Image: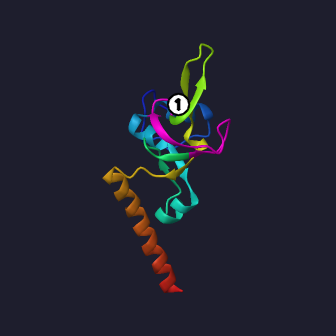
Amino acid sequence: MKQEFSTQWTGSVQPRKQRKYRINAPLHIKHKFLSANLSKPLREKYGKRNLPLRKGDEVLVMRGAFKKKKAKVVSVDLKNTRVALESMQRTKKDGSKVNVFFHPSVLQIQELNLDDKQRVAALNRKSSSQESKSAESKEKK
């Protein structure tokens, strides 16, 4: 694998190359690494399994000390592939509070932030193609 990031790289069995790919990836590709699972009702509604997290999405923590807690996404750190949630903080020794950052694989999206028209269009594009495929399969039977 070359020194700089390569879009032609298809994959490797070697963990060091996989890590190198993820670390050296540009931000527009790292955004895809921030995908979290959708809840079952959202999965049925949009016909998608996961989506990249955005500020304003409501998520459920599935693992760790904050398990089963719902919160809104406050900030997204593309560089470190981490997400900060509202009211999820730890107290430091000096008494100050700091945000706890979560990896997206630990989160499940409960509600989507649909302020962005492009995101809505992407969701509808996938769900409409899903509906047409299911309608075609029913006609064939």
Residue 17, x across and y down, in percent: 56, 33
The residue drawn where x is 48% and y is 85% is 139
In the rendered structure, does residue 21 fall within the stretch colored magenta? no
Q: Is residue 6 above or below residue 40?
A: above
Q: Which residue is mark 1?
A: 20
Q: Is 8 or 123 nearer to us in this picture?
A: 123
Q: Could you tell me which residue is drawn at 46 percent across and 69 percent down?
A: 130
**Left or right position of 100 against 4:** right
Viewer-proximal residue among 121 and 98: 98
Asked if the magenta segment contains residue 61, the reply would be yes
The residues colored magenta run 60-82
Q: Secondary structure at mark 1?
A: helix
Image quarter hosting the C terminus: bottom right
Q: Amino acid at mark 1?
A: Lys
The spot of residue 75 in percent (x, y) is 45, 34
The image quarter in which residue 70 lies = top right
Graded by Cα atoms within 10 Å as few (under 14), some (14 to 19) or many (20 or more), the crowding at tag 1 reads some
**Along the line of sight, the residue nearer the viewer: 22 or 42:** 42
Q: Is residue 42 above or below residue 33?
A: below
Where is residue 129 drawn, in percent x and y?
41, 68
The number of numbered badges drawn on the structure is 1
Across and down, in percent, residue 132 comes to 42, 74
Whether residue 38 is situated above or below residue 75 in the rendered picture: below
> Which residue lies most toward the top here?
94
| Residue shown at 50% from the left, 59% from the top | 48
